[in-house]
Amino acid sequence: MSELRKDPISNRWVIVSKERAQRPDYYSSKGDGSGDELCPFCPGNEKMTPPEILAYREDGTSANKPGWTLRVIPNKYPALRDGADFVPLGSGLFHGLSGIGSHEVIIEHPYHMTELEHLPENHITDCFRAFKKRLVDLKSDPQLQHITIFKNHGKSAGTTQEHTHCQLVALPVIPKEVSEQISRCRHYYSTNNICIYCDIISQERSQNLRIVAQNESFIALCPYASRFSFEITILPLNHSARYENCSDQELSSFAELFKETLTRLRKVLDNPPYNFVLHTAPVQKDDETDSIFHWHLSIFPKLTTLAGFEKGTGVYINPTLPEEAAETLRNAHIE
Amino acid sequence: MSELRKDPISNRWVIVSKERAQRPDYYSSKGDGSGDELCPFCPGNEKMTPPEILAYREDGTSANKPGWTLRVIPNKYPALRDGADFVPLGSGLFHGLSGIGSHEVIIEHPYHMTELEHLPENHITDCFRAFKKRLVDLKSDPQLQHITIFKNHGKSAGTTQEHTHCQLVALPVIPKEVSEQISRCRHYYSTNNICIYCDIISQERSQNLRIVAQNESFIALCPYASRFSFEITILPLNHSARYENCSDQELSSFAELFKETLTRLRKVLDNPPYNFVLHTAPVQKDDETDSIFHWHLSIFPKLTTLAGFEKGTGVYINPTLPEEAAETLRNAHIE
């Protein structure tokens, strides 16, 4: 059973999960993976994973058998477990909780070596529809406070399975970074009567220095204070705190801009390792949070290594000007 | 010229430094370094680096020539530059500063393939004496607010030069993480009338679950909410906010426990990549900070890869129980 532990000085939550040490290649410096083992995410190997939570399938096919186009399963090596009791842990200065929550894997499609952005837009939309479905379902669990969906692409960005997939982690606490950002959004709103993200979008559109691409509903830009080289944020143009409130039309428009943005990134950086993270408002329904927060997707290419300075101070060194990254991405010739 | 940029939502500072992109192997996914080039940190190659700032040398040898046992030089690819003017940058919602500060390299010894902890204790003490000297010198610059000394050991922990060395970065701002920690230390002190680190040391000594090693003046322990597998913190037993106030006797005692701790880590994890970071109080003299903060050295072995979840939420997943890490390190047979 894993534990959530809170550092008494930084107030940062850590998940201590011995289950995660059972994963293939968890010690990242060892080996490169031989690649000759069966892939648990390929059709025909469904028995290698826990039973599916959600699948989009051809008519007439059975659960946990081939015939699916997208499949959501519990993580076999979960950082957190659902169905457990909420137990306070620690003593004296140290505070913790039993590691309750959810940890799921979203297998985006059946094709082992195909990248998400190479699929047709309607399949990417299906994938984003699955994100929404899982968020909506998990929000009904009163123990869960925050849900993150993310992707690790490439071994140096943290993936241990080659077959492209995303992950979902639902926590019984709100991460410190998130609650601090919400506080600052609240402060900005109370002073300016507008969501800070809406104001940033407005400034970016008038300056036109860091925009990568846009369509009728979304914008992709390189943030002014990007932590990583070629970091990109995609945001809805219209204010919305919750990804899970997107209409089908919006998910389709999001898929279009996502596909274009990832295609530009791949063209410029030659298939770089990367992470993406979907930031939607914390679970609890709260009209104020709905006004002040703005959902977005962050894309972090993994070109440099986080070293002692970043880990020790939280200050990142980014060797690429965001304005130059945006220009290069904008000017890339894509189909 | 680099820039310091502040993210308007997280308040996190980022250094945008195009100079850093000129480094060998800056794009970490490319190549492994051929190893057949001249090492700029080896004796005889002093001309490959900027002129030295400090050196410990044999009598009768000249600056920037062989004969040194330790050498401090400006970083050839500095994230920040000294001697520049303090210029506010950015517009509207975005705030920045010209990238002033210092970025130095501490070449710990002349031997290309020797690790710091393999040297005699008196050489490690010399290295720690050089840290103190650089901190004391740089504190006289009124533009500098925070100084970090750190080490990246191994390519996956961020080093681009094999010859073992440390780095120093002096900033004209206090990193957000540091100022937040100082605030929490202040709050703890005001409620409990004792430094929180002193209280943690006292609890750790009474519980005796996470102690790795100790001597008459220092303690090494695996923190309760360790972010990383086998993370270790070394702290002075007696309260002191500033590393640079250490006596020669204390530096020697620190070197002894550092050597033992790194030797245990190497034995258990077979020469792992790691980072260490020296945390001393921010530059400005302030009697209150001196009461509430406690200097320490954090050691972060690099066994796992930071992935989308950590980068997006600031919540880390640690696959090793700190109590088990401490026990394994404590029980390792070393000479």
Image: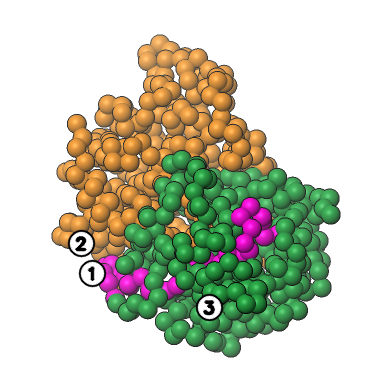
Chain colours: A green, B orange
Q: Mark 3 belongs to which subunit?
A: A
Q: Bin the neighbour count of mark 3 within 10 Å (Cα to Cα): few under 14, some 14-19, many 20 and up.
A: many
The CA span between labels 2 and 3 is 34 Å
- Is B318 one of the magenta-colored residues? no
Q: Residue furthest front?
A: A60
Q: Quadrant of residue B22?
A: top right
Range covered by the magenta-colored residues: A88-117
Is label 3 or label 1 in front? Answer: 3
Q: Look at the image and tell me whether residue A311 can be seen.
A: yes
Q: Secondary structure at mark 3?
A: loop
Can you give x and y, in whole percent of width and height, for residue A262 in the image? Answer: 71, 57
Q: Quadrant of residue B223?
A: bottom left
Is label 2 or label 3 in front? Answer: 3
Q: Residue at point 65% right, 77% down?
A: A59
The mark found on residue B203 in the picture is 2
Q: Which residue is mark 1?
A: A92
Q: Is A145 in front, or is A209?
A: A145
Q: Mark 1 belongs to which subunit?
A: A
Q: Residue at point 36% right, 68% down?
A: A4
* Quadrant (top left, top right, bottom left, bottom right) of the N terminus of chain B: top right
Can you give x and y, in whole percent of width and height, for residue A253 in the image? Answer: 76, 72
Asked whether, in this view, residue A304 is left or right of residue A100, the answer is: right
The CA span between labels 3 and 1 is 29 Å
Query: Given the image, on which type of amino acid does mark 3 rest?
Result: Pro
Query: Given the image, on which type of amino acid does mark 2 rest?
Result: Gln
Asked if the residues shown at circle 2 and circle 1 are in contact, with their CB atoms under 8 angstroms apart, the answer is: yes
Q: Which residue is mark 3?
A: A282
Q: Secondary structure at mark 2?
A: helix
